[in-house]
Amino acid sequence: MRRQYGARQGITRKIAAVIFAAAALFAGAAQLGLTSAQVPGVGAPGGELPSGEGVLTVGVVGIASTPLPLFAETAADRAVVSLTYRSLTRLDASGWPGPDVASAWSVAADGLSWTITLDPAAHWQDGSTVTAADVLTTIAIASELGTAGGYWQSITAEEGDDAGTVRMSASRALANLPTMLSSLPLLSATQFAGLSAAQIPDSDAAKVPQGSGPYRITSISSGGAGLVRRTDLLASDQAALAAAGTSAEKIALYFFPDAASALRGWTTSSLDQLVGLDIADARRGTAARGRTIELGSTVFSGIATNLRPGSVLRDPRLRAGLAALLDPVAITNVFGGSVARTPVSPLSWGWSALPDATSGVDYATSLFKSVKWKQGATGWSLPSGAAASLEILTLPALAHPADSAVAAQAAAAWTAFGIPTQVTELSPIDLTSRLASGAFQLAVLNVDVGIDVDLYPLLGSGAVLTGGNVAGIQLKDLDVLLNRARQPGDRAARTASLVALQKWLAETNYILPIRFRSVELLSSSRVTHVTPMLVGEPESYLRAVLSFRLATP
């Protein structure tokens, strides 16, 4: 008998300023000089964490609260979930999806439905098989919660015609479905039968860890968690272990209430890895020992231009000239991340190397003169003869220093070039209002483009009406490229479509690119085979833990 869960149609991606604020945390860890208390609502007892040769020790900034898929609230929760639960797919370092609970998947010719085949070797801790019912239950709960901005509300899921399969469909082709499935750790349908999403976190069922991942919890407290590798690993797990040679049989997670205590823990102990520090603290950590490894985020930062009729920046040569005067490297040197050429991360499977952008005052001057701007003793003037000036909007410097630095650098460079540029700081509400109404010239913008990059909500003609396309650009040829890039296909086909889009965007500079944000993972010399990777959340780097090699004495 089939069970089907329908949902509202249409997918929207909210574009807003990304605010990284430190949350107030409490409690501590039993080890590294902190105190311990059992996590409320989790049945596994607290206790000493594992230690010894085959143990990987990982520090996380955050205290465990609800280490359960879909309900994880803190970095510690997400770290535990990454190790103890499985999703249908698992991403490689570039963000391309591979098998996890799903052993295979295929898409219909019209691109509107996918058939997912489950690996019969995937089991829960109690030995029961992971089934289609578990998948349907998880999607239903995700839909009820509005997870991923309501993405799962647009998916209809049902048991497939063949045993051990699930069919998923939507109103439009979703190339990113296999990638999105990687961010949806499965819950047990049996364990949470009859419970609504609101009832699950405080239920008795949630107190008993029942994961499907490569590790299981042996102890957990507000100070840390002990985990041991399961013996019933999947084929992909076995392959990773074989390649690593010597991998972690056990993991000790240490939870720190704040960055300061985490940094002290790193400098005064033998932690193998530490995640959750900002770039400044990560550099302080490497001054003591170890190295940093980039965990690239999906947040693209750039300077949006208003290209609506009447804008002075509609000619792409002007935007190229402004971009030629910027120095993104200076921003990444201070705030970290990767220099962006387009809104596709250099760590992504879809990224393509493009010719370096030409920079410098002479180049910018030639571009401005080519569009009949006039350079005088007091600065530049428009073809009409009016004096040129610009305004760049940004969020307040105190809460958003990186955004403020981008705006300040741009204003200084453009003013020195001869175009007086004013920086205007606005609250998030006021900035959003100005962008939505098109009442701006330029604005520092942060956009989560997703691991499987979909730029239509940012630049597509239809997105002007929804508020995503803040530039206001509407071009049929661009829409064709944007839509091709979001069509299902194999890796080669999808890469080719993204390459074509990146070339277009690099030539047009609708958004002057600055960087992709990132977090730096601290790692000791004891751990190798750890590479930079693209992640949705920093703690999800632990998805690759079976491939890490531990040095032997």
Image (cartoon, helix red, strand yellow):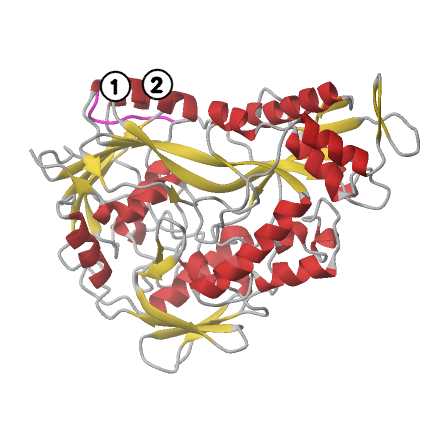
Instruction: Pinpoint residue 7: horizontal percent, then vertical percent.
Output: 55, 66
Instruction: Pinpoint residue 230: horizontal percent, then vertical percent.
Output: 16, 53
Residue depicted at x 19% and y 25%: 31
> Which amino acid does the dot numbered 2 rest on?
Arg
Q: Is residue 249 magenta?
A: no
Instruction: Please name the predominant secondary structure of the magenta segment in the image.
Output: loop
How many C-alpha atoms fall within 10 Å of the one at disc 2: few (<14), some, or many (≥20)? Answer: few
Q: Secondary structure at mark 2?
A: helix
The span from disc 2 to disc 1 (Cα, nearest Å) is: 9 Å
Side (left or right) of 74 relative to 127: right
Position of residue 70 relative to residue 490, above or below, is: above
The earlier-in-sequence mark between 2 and 1 is 1
* Outermost left residue: 553
| Disc 2 and disc 1 in contact, CB within 8 angstroms | yes
Question: Which of the 4 quarters of the picture holds residue 385?
Answer: top right
Side (left or right) of 534 relative to 499: left
Position of residue 226 relative to residue 472, above or below, is: above
Find the magenta span and give its range.
25-32
Q: Where does label 2 land, which residue?
A: 284
Seen from the viewer's position, the closer of residues 491 and 284 is 491
Q: Where does label 1 land, which residue?
A: 267
